[in-house]
Image: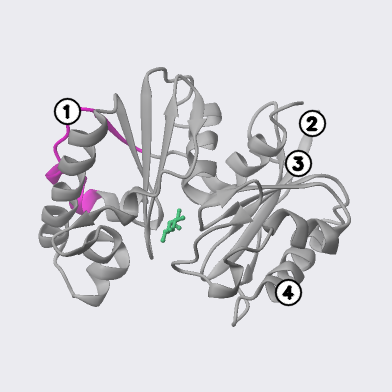
């Protein structure tokens, strides 16, 4: 059995659990700690260490991170501390942990997890995942192969960027009704469908949980098959572990 510690680093919480890569199931209960403030590289690495220590973990780690990641280095920092820009996330964490660490974008991780073990298991063609939370994250998989760092939450629309128009943060901030928010999100979906024509669109993030989903899912129309994610809050953890273990 190959087990890797999957960790999802977010703006408010850092969550993780060991993942059995043959089934995608967590081999121990998920551990969560608050994201330290300020969430600098040193403080986040410390929180990751706390999480790994909770599981007495010394093996390989896969991390989902809310930024564009190229060769382990964060290139953006929309919803995290700006000091991450240019920082080699893999290096910072592996030096602290003294174990191999692989890092990828959080939406990319969720999509990899959903494709391998969740709602889009085995889907071929063009699979798009959109996460809706503080920001909007996106991921594309073509016949199961990840096209990383698509960052479609930063598409320009209506004089701003998509995540400042249709994220869950904006729904709450602007006190939008579900219908008003769904109208905005529909505009965004129309735009990404026009640009990419995906076969399947998965909606994830906190807003895709069943109770909330019931408020708006029926208001959305797409040409693509529109599905909620099924691994919910664990998609990033499972996908990050699967990605880290991709060669095994
Ligand atoms: C970031 C993305 C991330 C998304 C969801 C956006 O602000 O630019 O990299 O995937 O938020 O966390």
Q: Earlier in the sequence, mark 3 or mark 4?
A: 3
Picture quarter with ligand 1: bottom left
> Which residue position holds label 3?
4
Against 223, residue 158 (above or below) is below
Q: Residue at x 51, y 57 (%)?
A: 67
Q: Mark 2 or mark 4, which is nearer to you?
A: 4
User: Residue 243: x and y, percent?
Assistant: 64, 36
Q: Are marks 2 and 3 in contact (CB under 8 Å)?
A: yes
> Which residue position holds label 1?
223
Residue 121 visible here: yes
Is label 2 in a helix, a strand or a loop? Answer: loop
Residue nearest the observer in this picture, 78 or 16: 78
Q: Is mark 1 within 8 Å of ligand 1?
A: no
Is label 4 in a helix, a strand or a loop? Answer: helix
Marker disc for residue 42: 4
Q: Is residue 5 left or right of residue 67?
A: right
Q: From the image, which quarter does the N terminus lie in?
A: top right
Is label 3 in a helix, a strand or a loop? Answer: strand
> Which residue position holds label 2?
2
Magenta-highlighted residues: 214-228
Disc 1 to disc 2, how far (Cα)? 38 Å
Q: Is mark 3 within 8 Å of ligand 1?
A: no
Q: Residue at x 20, y 54 (%)?
A: 215
């Amino acid at each position: 059995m190959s087990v890797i510690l999957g960790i999802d680093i977010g703006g408010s919480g850092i969550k993780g659990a060991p993942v059995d890569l043959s089934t995608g199931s967590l081999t121990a209960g998920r551990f969560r700690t608050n994201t330290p403030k300020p969430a600098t590289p040193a403080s986040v690495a410390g929180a990751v260490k706390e999480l790994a220590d909770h599981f007495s973990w010394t093996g390989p780690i896969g991390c989902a991170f809310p930024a564009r990641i190229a060769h382990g280095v964060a290139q953006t920092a929309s919803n995290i501390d700006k000091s991450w820009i240019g920082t080699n996330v893999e290096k910072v964490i592996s030096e602290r942990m003294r174990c191999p660490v692989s890092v990828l974008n959080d939406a990319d991780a969720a999509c990899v997890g959903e494709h391998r073990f969740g709602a889009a298991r085995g889907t071929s063609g063009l699979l798009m995942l959109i996460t809706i939370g503080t920001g909007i994250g996106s991921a594309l998989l073509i016949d199961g192969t990840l096209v990383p760092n698509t960052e479609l939450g930063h598409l320009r629309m209506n004089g701003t960027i998509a995540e400042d128009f249709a994220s869950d943060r904006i729904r709450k901030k602007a006190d939008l009704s579900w219908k008003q928010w769904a109208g905005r999100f529909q505009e965004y979906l129309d735009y990404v469908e026009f640009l990419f024509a995906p076969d399947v669109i998965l909606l994830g993030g906190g807003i895709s949980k069943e109770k909330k989903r019931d408020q708006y899912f029926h208001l959305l129309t797409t040409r693509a098959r529109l599905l909620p994610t099924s691994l919910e809050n664990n998609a990033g953890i499972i996908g990050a572990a699967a990605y880290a273990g991709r060669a095994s």
